[in-house]
Amino acid sequence: MKDTNSLSVIVLAAGKGTRMKSPLPKVLHPVVGQPMVKRVLDVAKALGAVQRRVVVGHGEALVRRVVEPMGAVAYSQKEQRGTADAVKAADPASLDGTVMILSGDVPLIEVADMQTVLTEFNALKADIAVVTADLKNPGSLGRIVRQKGELRAIVEASDAGPDTLKIREINSGAYVAKADVLTKLLDKVKPNNAKGEYYLTDIISIGIEEGYKVVAIKTRPAVAFGVNTQAELARASRIVFKRNRNRLMENGVVMIDPASVYAEDDVQIGSGSVVYPGVYLRGDTRIGNFCVLEPGVHIYSSIVGDSTHIKAGCYFENSVIGTKVQIGPYARLRPESDVGNEVHIGNFVELKKTKFGARSKAGHLSYLGDAIVGEDVNIGCGTITCNYAPDRKKYQTTIGNGVFVGSDVQFVAPVTIGAGATIASGSTVTEDVPADALAVARGRQVNKEGWKPKGS
């Protein structure tokens, strides 16, 4: 039974992208941390598309590895014979309802843009539509020719006369059609051009000739922004970064120099937080209210609690930081680090897979890996957990509440330090330490007065 109300999206992603001059398939080049084709598929999913089909060709195996985990189905275009042939490769004859055709290299489209297009398409009761936009400099893009407001043709720039080239409305490369109409029109496209390719634009002129209701639906210029060069890729990223900064500032985030702040799409920052220049926030990062992020901070998929101060040059990934914490400058939190409330972590301290309890301190120059550190613990300068053993396995260090660790201490894991213990500076701890004990694990100092080297 046909579902005439369903939406399917076909994404064209078979091109090589020669002008990118990169071995990576064009649609996999990232815009603000996400492959371009993923951005397009995210829009398709948000629109409620029941079928998301991606036409693959160049770099097929790599593109499949990105799109198939997203729930899209890849269809191979065996030969590069033009855009109409690419759409046919996605088997539109097996689809019902409405079909939207998008390019995989248009990373600036948003859900609201395409939802508006669909709403207008349905309101006009159209059979097929080309999505258009007005550009200040249309360049080599196909022009939309109208007569008394009605669409009459798409004219390629190479075939256009002087008057047609003055037209600013262009073909964005996106289309919407009834599935059955699309199938019929694709069968009528012929390779009547020097390259012998099947052009998707021809379905518009054929549709008009066949008496279908063919319309042009105008939207924002961003929908027509296709990436073909590295310069255009960088420009797309700049636009998305600016979009993200504006979103954050509208929610009360203070940015000293917005243009120098880089936040990816899923980043959230609470109101009243201050972000200094040179900050880069990636992945699923969430920053609380009233935080301070000093210059050069780089955070990837981490959570930072309210009123936390992150000083210059810190690098965090896949970690959790509590409230009222002070970290840095130049501290590093590696994956699975969990920092409690009111903690102080100073300069050149590194944590890896470590739980660091509330109100504990590690002032400077320490490495804590595969460790559990309790509350109210003092970690002295130069402390190291020796977690990697000759058997190439990693072992855990456990430090109880209220422990005082002097400077230059090595914990040779696995080892457990009881609550309230004190570890003397310069100790290499290889055995468990009981609660409230003093551990001294170092060579006895010997002074030989009047000693001189032989022969002196």
Image: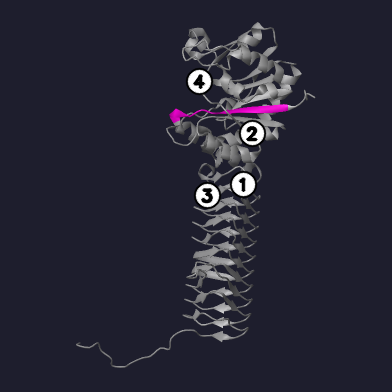
Q: Mark 2 points at which residue?
A: 73
Above or below, comparing residue 145 to residue 70 in the picture: above
Residue type pointed to by label 4: Asn
Q: Which mark is residue 267?
A: 1
Of circles 2 and 4, the one toward us is 2
Mark 1 to mark 2: distance in Å?
29 Å
Quarter of image, res 12: top right
Q: Name the residue under label 3.
A: 279
Residue type pointed to by label 1: Val
Residue at 53% in and 58% down: 311
Q: Which residue lies furthest to the left in this view?
A: 455
Q: Where is residue 132 in the image (x, y as percent from the top left)?
A: 61, 20
Residue type pointed to by label 2: Val
The front one of 286 and 75 is: 75
Mark 1 to mark 3: distance in Å?
12 Å
Q: In which quarter of the image is the N terminus?
A: top right
Q: What element carries label 1?
A: loop
Mark 2 to mark 4: distance in Å?
36 Å
- Of callouts 1 and 2, which one flags the residue occurring earlier in the amino acid sequence? 2
Q: Where is residue 232 in the image (x, y as percent from the top left)?
A: 48, 31
Mark 3 to mark 4: distance in Å?
34 Å
Q: In which quarter of the image is the C terminus?
A: bottom left
Above or below, comparing residue 43 to residue 306 in the picture: above
Asked whether residue 48 is drawn in magenta, I would say no
Q: Name the residue under label 4.
A: 137
